[in-house]
Image (cartoon, rainbow, N blue to C red):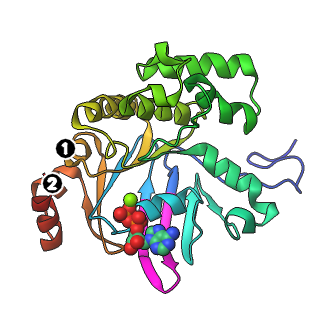
Amino acid sequence: PAPAGRTADSKRTIAPVTDETTPVLEIRNLHKAFGDLEVIKGVDITARKGDVVSLIGSSGSGKSTILRCANLLEDSQQGEIIFKGEPVKWRGTGLHRHPADFGQVLRIRTNLSMVFQQFNLWSHMTILQNVMEAPLTVLRRPRAEVESAARAYLDKVGIGEKHDAYPAQLSGGQQQRAAIARALCMEPEALLFDEPTSALDPELEQEVIRVIKDLAAEGRTMLIVTHDMKMAADISSHTVFLHQGLIEEEGAPKDLFGAPKSERLRQFLSSTV
Ligand code: ADP
Ligand code: MG
């Protein structure tokens, strides 16, 4: 028999060693420039299973860019994205992507499922079809299984009865909850939220915040960019304050919000309501 910890076939790629302590996502020394504009200047973020990491900072500080790099929507000039112990290596984005990297991109997109500010639902599909689309066509899971999961996730976010509606027939809060159900239906390792409530009226914001709070309470791993300091303080295990592409201060939310050390963070917090 093969020795413990080895596969019988020595040519097989040995899977990266993962255990409870291996982070779901590590961003290491990330650098990103758009042309001459350097927007991320060496950022490290780690999310372990069950962590809720919130990213705060003023507009233009680079929050969305970090999420987009983590999700491989953008490539970066320097640094590493490590998913469950496995460094992600890829070349080019979109049409310029190297064909050999498609599998890896698929794995990351599936496992780091993103929820956008503007929901990004497909307008010509019903809510149920929106939720079922990627698991069916991208993951090729069986239709019956996907449909029952999709219905369960729509129920979970409180819009089960809206499955036959089109996005335009729903309120913004309902659309965003549908987008969350769609992300959940990929059965991802972690959810990435980019300002999930900032396109919503205050009264609709609350229904989305409630769903996100429930997900946090369930122990979901999440990276959340938000302007909502109250939500960040309530649900985060770790908060990162970004300033001009660098982490200016980070730590437990009670320290960051309760006793900010840096003058910039103090100013930022006093400028947000
Ligand atoms: P935030 O989400 O914190 O508001 P972003 O990550 O969207 O910040 O943007 C950080 C900086 O990068 C900004 O100066 C923004 O104008 C710039 N930027 C973002 N995306 C692009 C792009 N595709 N092309 C050029 N500049 C960009
Ligand atoms: Mg942004």
Residue 32 magenta-highlighted: yes
Q: Residue furthest bottom?
A: 36
Tell me the quadrant of the picture where the N terminus can be found: top right
The residue tagged 1 is 230
Q: Which residues are magenta?
A: 26-45
Say whether mark 2 is within 8 Å of ligand 1. Answer: no
Tell me the crowding category of disc 1: few under 14, some 14 to 19, or many 20 or more residues within 10 angstroms, Cα based.
few
Q: Nearer the viewer, residue 235 or 167?
A: 167
- Amino acid carrying label 2: it is Phe
Displayed quadrant of residue 266: bottom left
Q: Residue 64, position in %: x, y?
A: 42, 60
Residue 241 magenta-highlighted: no
Q: Nearer the viewer, residue 201 or 103?
A: 201
Above or below, 28 against 78 in this view is above
Which residue is pictured at 39% across the width and 45% down the height?
Answer: 51
Which residue is pictured at 46% across the width and 25% down the height?
Answer: 169
Say which mark, if any, is on residue 257: 2
Displayed quadrant of residue 78: bottom right
Q: Residue 19, position in %: x, y?
A: 56, 45
